[in-house]
Amino acid sequence: MGDDGETISAANTLGIQHPPGYPLHTITAKAFSLIPAGDPSFRGCLFSVFLELACFLLAYLVSKLALDTAAIGTLSALTLSVAPAITAAGFTIWEQSIIAKGGIYIMNVLFTLSLTAVALVLYRDKARHVKYLFLFAFIYGLSLTHHHMSQEIALPAYAILLYRSGVLKKAGPRRIAAALLFFALGLSAYIYMPIRANTAVLNWGSPSTWDNFWMMVTRWQYVRSEITRSAAGSLTQAWKYMTSVSYAFAYAGILFAAVGMAVFYRKERTLFWYFVSIPVLFLGVTMVYLNLSKDRLYIMETYITPVYFPLALFACAGLIRVSEKLSSLLRLNAGAIEAVLLAALLSAQCVMFYPKLDKSRYFYVYDYCRNLLNTMDPQSVLFTTGDGVVFPTWYLKYVKKYRPDVTLAGSAVIPMQWVRDGMKKQNPNLRMPVITQKVGTESTGYIINAVIRGNIANFPVYFSYNKPEENSLGDEFAIVPKGIAQKVLPKQFARVTGQYTVMTDSMWKFYNLRGVFGRGRNFASGTSTGLYIKDYAVSLNSTGIFFEDNGMMDMALQYFTKAHYFDPTDHEFIYNMGNAAYNMGDMTKAAQLYRECLRLNPRYESGWYNLGVACYTARDYKCALESFRKVKELSPSRTDVDGNIFLLEKLAR
């Protein structure tokens, strides 16, 4: 789903992902793409699993170094497994460990653990072996070629341990210079991007020039849209941070973490400040930097993945302390109590998270995008917007080699030259507008319109579920629903024909709709239900409107009814069914459908108005009067219903 398609496609084709490019992940994931087992998507997910297993082992090592240095508890295998286990079983880490894009965030955790381990060795040994500074510098440089924003956030935390270890004083100028060379060596993984820019099939940003490279690495296209602009937004994001962290530890784990913080504070304050600074730094930055709407707050869960292990380590210390207290009170073995508490916490996490993370029958994305590509005529041009369609269709085309004849074009980013160059690579026969200067998003619609006008005579042109950008159709074109796509046609041809009716009906019988109905919805995330299933319904509704506009009310009612079947929660589909029934002269059915619509949304003004009209036509004046009064109640400024109410008050006596 979403970015997973891009991540897998980039690894398989050695391409360049969206900013900052993630070259290190792409290169290493390529090795897993060569494993002769399963589908390429399975191998992409398997790489994430591998990274999480590596994180588990590193977390075990860091637990040993930290607990030993702070002299907390008896370092049994069980004790050292506590923090790694409850980290791995947390909702976000578990979720990211089994999806392809999640490997990027898990690799970020891997870097945080690696740098923590090296810094802990330096701190514990009081920088006896300065060579570890070189290793730290190399790993940190390498980490910046991945998800560098997170590692930059954590840098002040790393500085605490490095400073307290004394390594910077012992190193001297020559060793500091050598460390900088190791840092540069790690950073050199970025060379991959300009090397591949001119040949990669997936070439986001085309970082072959210094300007393009710099804009990619700095994520320039996202920066201005991400900075939080209001105190309310910051508070909302802070609350999301708190709830996400608490949920990941099944709530009870946070209580253990609070106890563990006190234990670390008493035992080893440098380590306390180090491990507490990582969650605090991420909280501060996510509050003031990210600018997320309510429906996109879930993104924060992945941004903060490095905070989960430090909190889990505190929880481990807390669990040890609670076990010791209970042991003295109950006269039971502390290790046995620790095992019971850990088992209870892990069981709570599994019971809460497994049903939501089960992807064993998760076909929505794959089927939807195949259905979309199957809708295309040969040699079509498909304009798409949104990660939910763009990246999975990349995967189907470039990795699975499914419908390679279709030219994929990202509508929202078409002002960027590399996007138009990519279209030309896909189909050298396309006629593309010549633009000699940089243009912004205000030109998006005009550029799309130029592409359509230059190519519609030779290649069928489609849009995916999104509404076409403003000015993209102009006055000469219209869109005609075709299954879950929208075909662009000259306005004089945008009409219903017998062939269109048969084709549209056959299209929906042909689509693969695994899991869309019945029990299959249990395996859908809220995002899938909200995007893919909803879009099936919206597409059917659009087809119904198209038939309605062409005077074919029976066909319109049929497609409005199908839309309602796909998504029974949307009041507008039932409202449209009522309109079709009204236009067919069936006032009783129309009124019934309007009432069903209003049960879903009692404040739907148009529903009340049309119910009033239907009731009036059926001479049910009392119903009509109540309906128009409701319209007036919802919208007191409306004067068009005053006459209706005045007349009906007389008729209803």
Image (cartoon, rainbow, N blue to C red):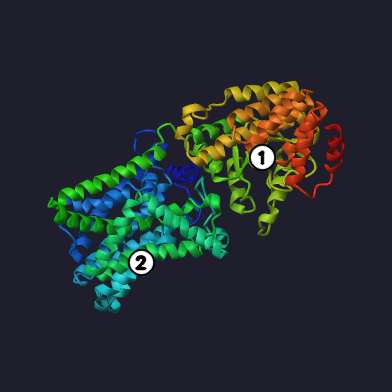
Q: Earlier in the sequence, mark 1 or mark 2?
A: 2
State the separation of the CA atoms marked 1 and 2: 49 Å
Please say if 534 is above or below 30. above
Percent across and percent down for residue 70 are: 20, 65
Q: Residue at x 25, y 73 (%)?
A: 165
Q: Nearer the viewer, residue 237 or 374?
A: 237
Looking at the image, can residue 320 be seen?
yes
Looking at the image, can residue 459 be seen?
no
Q: Which residue is mark 1?
A: 602
Image position of 622 (left or right of 142): right
Percent across and percent down for residue 604 are: 69, 41
Instruction: Identify the secondary structure beneath mark 2.
Output: helix
Q: Which residue is mark 2?
A: 277
Instruction: Identify the secondary structure beneath mark 1.
Output: loop
Image position of 593 (left or right of 492): left
Percent across and percent down for residue 250 are: 35, 48
Amino acid bearing label 1: Pro
Q: Residue at x 80, y 26 (%)?
A: 618
Q: Residues within 10 Å of mark 2 (few under 14, many from 20)?
A: some
Please say if 555 is above or below 217. above
Q: Residues within 10 Å of mark 1 (few under 14, many from 20)?
A: some
- Give the number of the mark in front: 1 or 2: 1
Percent across and percent down for residue 99 are: 41, 43
Q: Nearer the viewer, residue 409 or 64?
A: 64
Image position of 234 (left or right of 154): right
Amino acid bearing label 2: Ser
Q: Residue at x 52, y 57 (%)?
A: 208
Q: Nearer the viewer, residue 457 or 130?
A: 130
State the mark number for residue 234: none
The quadrant holding residue 39 is top left
